[in-house]
Image (cartoon, helix red, strand yellow):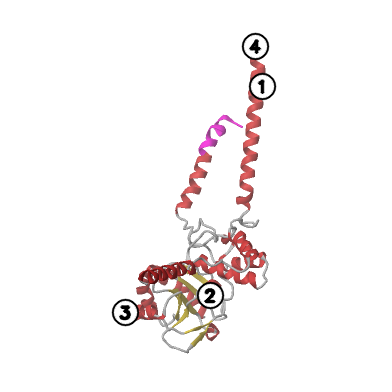
Amino acid sequence: MKRWIVLFYMLTACALVFAGEAKPLAEDPVLEARLKSLSQELRCLVCQNQTLADSNAPLAEDLRKEIREQMHAGKSDKEVVDYLVARYGDFVMYRPPMKRSTMLLWLGPFVGFLIGAVFLIRTLKKRAGNEDFEAEEE
Amino acid sequence: MSKLVKSLLPLALFFIVVGFLFKGLYLDPHEVPSPLVGKPAPLFNAPVLAETGKKFSSEEMKGKVWLLNVWASWCGACREEHPVLMDMSKISEIQLYGLDYKDTDAEAQDVLKTAGNPYKLVATDMDGRIGIDYGVYGVPETYLIDKSGVIRYKQIGPITKELLYTKILPMVKELQR
């Protein structure tokens, strides 16, 4: 009899373990995928080098919750981003918009590349000219 | 290009880069300029701390210049700021209201009981919803709101004595005219 009682407790203990298994995160996997891809484009303002998707800061959790609710309410990705930009500024976006203040940021690398290319071509031309000259001399 | 200009070019470039880096030393990347400055302050209606059943609506503040200080009992920098807020509460021109952000009533009341209560009233934002509307990302944050309900200034991080007397108080007086 004692054995049976022990067995009974062991089985119920097992049942308890199973009851603690993780529930699926959300009912709607499509929405959850949208949330994930969108929050990877957004910056967490508390730990600024993390995306909203990666951050465990309480604010990031709140914002993910907010975004999820807005998506549930049928808002588009753009509407959600606009909502956040209105509150936290362009800084929340990992890809800042083209504006006068961000011109240098967007065009700077290309300008740098252009200057480098011009410099390279000029140097190469000069060097080629020198070689011709040396060849003639020989 | 003359030889002299050519030889000085790298040095000039070097100084330009140094200039940018030097400027960068004094920029705080945690201070994100709020897009809400110059825009109407989001309206909210929230329970009042320590007064069950009572609610505070930000619309009641129409026609007044007021300060909304977002704080919490768990926030270390708020404690640093607290003495300055106590000073502020003694200045007659300043109407200081608090927003208790993601806190519990009991702990918030405890802080005000032991350190003093500088606020005319404290509204509570337990789930952080009002905070999101105001673009709060790091307490303490303080908003200066004018008579028509427009945010005129946002302070991110603790208010210092210097800031109070050189910036906030003059702005308040200016807006009250």
Q: How many marks?
A: 4
Q: Magenta includes B4?
A: yes
* Disc 3: host chain: B
User: What kind of residue is marked 3?
Assistant: Thr
Have a look at marks 1 and 4 and say if they share a chain. yes
* Disc 4: host chain: A
Q: Where is residue B170 in the image (x, y as percent from the top left)?
A: 46, 74
Between the residue at mark 2 and the residue at mark 4, the CA separation in whole angstroms equals 81 Å
Q: Nearer the viewer, mark 2 or mark 3?
A: 2
Check whether the beta carbons of the residues at disc 1 and disc 4 lie within 8 A of each other: no
Between the residue at mark 3 and the residue at mark 1, the CA separation in whole angstroms equals 83 Å
Q: In this view, does A61 lie above or below B14?
A: below
Asked whether the viewer can see residue B90, the reply is no
Residue farthest to the bottom?
Answer: B53
Residue drawn at (48%, 64%) of the image: A57
Check whether the beta carbons of the residues at disc 3 and disc 1 lie within 8 A of each other: no
> Which residue has dot 3 on it?
B114
Between the residue at mark 1 and the residue at mark 2, the CA separation in whole angstroms equals 70 Å
> Which residue has dot 4 on it?
A137
User: What kind of residue is marked 1?
Assistant: Gly
> Which residue has dot 1 on it?
A129
User: What kind of residue is marked 2?
Assistant: Arg
Asked whether the viewer can see residue B43, the reply is yes
Region in magenta: B1-11
